[in-house]
Image (tube, grey):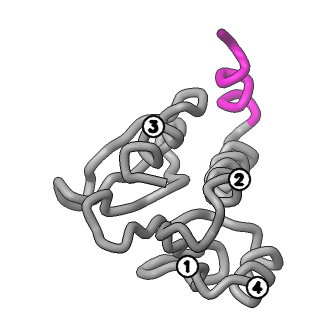
Amino acid sequence: MTPQELRTFCLSFNAAVEEFPFNPDTSVFKVLGKMFALCHLDAQPLKVNLKCEPDMAVQLRAAHPEIVPGWHMNKRHWNTVTVDGELPDTQVRELIEDSYDLVVAGLPRAERLRLDRP
């Protein structure tokens, strides 16, 4: 997955936006003000921080050396995923989608309903 493909996929979700609150090089992808992905798109190798259910985070880290506790994040809830071709792109997309879904599930009901409207 290329940096542009990662950006495009993150922005494909309903109400997803890209912001740069930390510096002009670090993309933060949010839904209704809540972060679901964070990465430096020019980094080599490309890495992305993604939210994850705590039990699943531990399982993913044990199964894949490309997935480690979230760098500069709450390590219980966030993973850093190296996107260098070792993990299939489909799995990276699933991890991004899971992160988005977790964040949406944590939004107040009224905000979740706003996402369902066209």
Q: Is residue 63 left or right of residue 96?
A: right
The amino acid at mark 1 is Asn
Of mark 4 and mark 1, the one earlier in the sequence is 4
Asked whether 22 or 89 is in front, the reply is 89
The residue where tag 4 is placed is: 63
Asked whether 49 or 6 is in front, the reply is 6
At which x and y percent is residue 114?
Answer: 66, 21
At which x and y percent is residue 59?
Answer: 80, 82
Check residue 95 for magenta coloring: no
The residue where tag 1 is placed is: 74
At which x and y percent is residue 13?
Answer: 59, 33
10 Å neighbourhood of mark 2: few (<14), some, or many (≥20)?
few
The residue where tag 3 is placed is: 8
Magenta residues span 109-118
Q: Helix, strand, or loop for circle 4?
A: helix
Marks 3/2: CA distance? Answer: 14 Å
Marks 4/2: CA distance? Answer: 16 Å
Marks 1/2: CA distance? Answer: 21 Å
Q: Residue at x 45, y 81 (%)?
A: 71
Of marks 4 and 1, the one in the foreground: 4
Of mark 3 and mark 1, the one earlier in the sequence is 3
The amino acid at mark 2 is Glu
The amino acid at mark 3 is Thr
Depicted 87 relative to depicted 34: above or below: below
Q: Which mark is residue 46?
A: none
Of mark 1 and mark 2, the one earlier in the sequence is 1
Residue at the outermost left position:
24
Marks 3/1: CA distance? Answer: 26 Å
